[in-house]
Image (tube, rainbow, N blue to C red):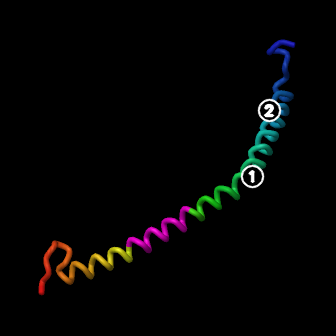
Amino acid sequence: MERGDIQPSSLVIKVSKAIGKRLAKLGVHQERLASPINETQGKLLDKVKNLTKDLTEKDEKIGELYSAGLVNGFNKG
């Protein structure tokens, strides 16, 4: 069978089936990967929250030291 012997209508059916199979495989992989992605995203968000909290606490502490005049190596009093 040569290239010219294939009917366009049968080619469309074959291509449609092939695309359907690929989409089904992608769907399975997407479901399989969804859980690890969500888990990793949750871990990263928790880490960012913890780092933000830590930075805020340290910023407050440096603010207290600055107000006391201790940041630049001298005391106001």
Q: Does 75 appear in magenta?
A: no
Q: For the residue marked with disc 1, what is the amino acid?
A: Arg
- Residue shown at the point (74%, 47%) measured from the top left: 29
Within the image, what quadrant is residue 41 found in?
Answer: bottom right
Relative to residue 39, is residue 10 depicted above or below?
above
Q: Which residue is mark 2?
A: 15
Nearer to me, 72 or 12: 72
Tell me the SS state at disc 2. helix
State left or right for residue 72 relative to residue 25: left
Q: Residues within 10 Å of mark 1 (few under 14, many from 20)?
A: few
Return the mark for residue 10. Answer: none
Relative to residue 22, is residue 31 depicted above or below?
below
**x, y percent for residue 42:** 60, 64
State left or right for residue 73 relative to residue 39: left
**x, y percent for residue 61:** 31, 78
Q: Which residues are magenta?
A: 44-55
Q: Which residue is mark 1?
A: 32
- Residue shown at the point (38%, 71%) measured from the top left: 55
> Most extreme residue toward the bottom, as rendered?
77
Q: For the residue marked with disc 2, what is the amino acid?
A: Val
State the quadrant of the C terminus.
bottom left
Tell me the SS state at disc 1. helix
State left or right for residue 44 relative to residue 1: left
**x, y percent for residue 63:** 27, 79
- Residue shown at the point (48%, 70%) measured from the top left: 50
Whole-Å distance between the Cαs marked 1 and 2?
A: 26 Å
